[in-house]
Every structure is written in structure tokens, then in C-alpha cells.
Amino acid sequence: MDPTSRPAVVIDYGTGYTKMGFAGNVEPCFISPTVVAVNESFLNQSRTSSKANRLAQHSAGVMADLDFFIGEEALTKSRSSNTYSLSYPIKHGQVDNWDAMERYWQQCIFNYLRCDPEDHYFLLTESPLTAPESREYTGEIMFETFNVPGLYIAVNSVLALAAGYTTSKCEMTGVVVDVGDGATHVVPAADGYVIGSSIKSIPISGKDVTLFIQQLMRERGENVPPEDSFEVARKVKETHCYTCSDIVKEFNKHDKEPAKYIKHWRGIKPKTGAPYSCDIGYERFLGPERNSH
């Protein structure tokens, strides 16, 4: 079927999360963590197979291609089983592991969006300051592996600027402050084109807040399983953290009325299934406060 008669596939991938869906929709169909879990037993079997047994090596490689998960499924598998290793294909806004990235796209297209890539045009995003070689490699994978009929790669900051306009008659000129999970960029754009020489990159992002909260909870001795500590810190950041105008007053409020301001987190240990709980105190405002300076 002619791809122009079907909506384009939009995949906005970032360091922490990937949003995917179809053009024309108000919201993404899926929002998934950008992470891949691969069964290491099959990978080790593939690496250690002797040259004489090429059939076994091929079978191990095929199984390795099949036995992997992405997003929340990947996080669940890695916490409940020691045979799965996590791979984060994007670091600081740039693709760091192309093999894992190709696996991630495969799951996005076939398992989540459930579409034939040969029947849709594709719109992908990239971070500012991305090297041209990265864009070339993205095109190579999309055209040669997935046989897409057409591809457009746009800087996500420009798309965010375009989404802010309510009329079609616009110059798309402005400054976008893009605070992501792996990097923060200040991106000026004129007439829809990024002014590359004026982009400013700040090495502080959402993941730094998560790691700091994880450190605070660990130093306080909270009863959080090590394999679950990062995810707990991330969920604490997303649900309980806030910024304050006066940090001294905030300490005094927490000390004066701890029952009012201290939150409680309850979870289940992934490997044993036993319940656990922990307190969420000063990190509610210390996490954002540390990275706001």
C-alpha cells in the first residue's frame, strides 16, 4: 500500500524515555524507558561456540536476537533474574550502543506499534550537537534493516518549538531549553533551523537528580534492595520531589512536623517477593535543590 495513505510513524527517543506513536495523534501511543535487557546465557553461548559447530553458533545468535526485552519489561526481567543484563543504548543524548539501539527500534516497531515499516514513512528525533555520522548510521539501519520508504530526522528542540505555535503561519524562531534525562541543552532556532554555533550544553540532567536521591537514601541506611534502588529513586523523584524557596525553612518544617512532610515508600523485593518500606525525607527538596545551582 502507498505509504502516503497511512500516518507516519513518530519515534522520539531520548536518554531516559522514548515516546512513540503515529502522526496526527494528540498523544504518543507508548512512553517507554530507553533500555534493553538481553539474555546473557545466549550471548555467551554465541561467543564461546567453536568454529567447528557453526550451526550451534548460528542458533545461539538467532535465540539471542529473539530473547530480549525493552522498557519496563526489561527492568522487570533484570530485577527478577540474574541472566538478563541491562543496556542503555543512549547516553547523554547520543546513541552509544548501535546494536542495542537497533534491537530497541525493532521492538518499538513490531511489538509496540505493530506496524509494517515498509508501509509507513518515519519521523525520528535526534539531540542537538549530534554528529553527522550518527545520522548516517541511523539512516542506514532504517533503510537497510527495516526497509522504510522514507525517513526524516529532526532535532527534538525544533519540534518542541513547532509544537508551541498555534498557527501555520509562523517563523519558528525562539530559544528552547531542553532538560532531558541525560543532558540539558539551550538551543536557539531561526526559521526552523538550529543555530549550531550558539547551542549551549549543560552537564546536569534528570539522571543526576535520580543518582543524588539514590545516594541520599543509601547514606541514610534505608532498607531498599540494591537492584531496586535506582528505580525507587527515580519514582521518588517523579512523585514526591519539589523545589523550595528557602532551604533552611524547609529543613525546619521537616524537623518540626516530620509526620506531615515525610513520605513512605512501600515495595516488594524483586528476587524474594518480600515486602519492604522506607522513608522519604530531606531528599524531597534536596534533590532538585542540589542541581538548581
Image (cartoon, rainbow, N blue to C red):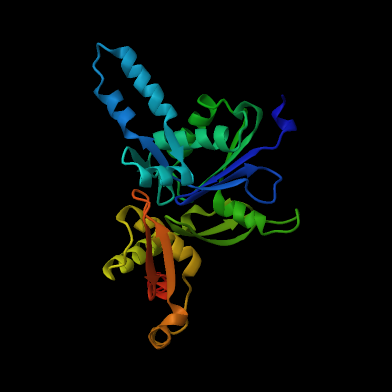
Q: Is residue 274 in sight in this rendering? A: yes
Q: Which residue is drawn at 37% across and 47% down?
A: 79
Where is residue 103, by image quadrant? top left
Give the residue furthest to the front.
274
Q: Is residue 171 left or right of residue 72?
A: right
Image spot of residue 286 (x, y percent): 39, 74
Give the residue furthest to the top.
52
Image spot of residue 183 (x, y percent): 43, 56
Where is residue 282, by image quadrant? bottom left
Q: Which residue is drawn at 58% across and 46% down?
A: 30
Image spot of residue 114 (x, y percent): 61, 33
Decide which of 247, 274 is in the foreground and name it: 274
Q: Is residue 205 in sight in this rendering? A: no
The quadrant in which the C terminus is found is bottom left
In the rendered image of this protein, does residue 258 appear above or below residue 215? below
In the rendered image of this protein, does residue 72 appear above or below residue 177? above
Decide which of 139, 207 is in the foreground and name it: 207
Q: Which residue is drawn at 31% across and 41% down?
A: 82
In the rendered image of this protein, does residue 120 appear above or below residue 276? above
Decide which of 275, 175 is in the foreground and name it: 275
The quadrant in which the N terminus is found is top right
Q: How many labels does the image show?
A: 0
In the rendered image of this protein, does residue 267 appear above or below residue 102? below
Q: Residue at x 60, y 55 (%)?
A: 160
Q: Is residue 92 left or right of residue 139?
A: left
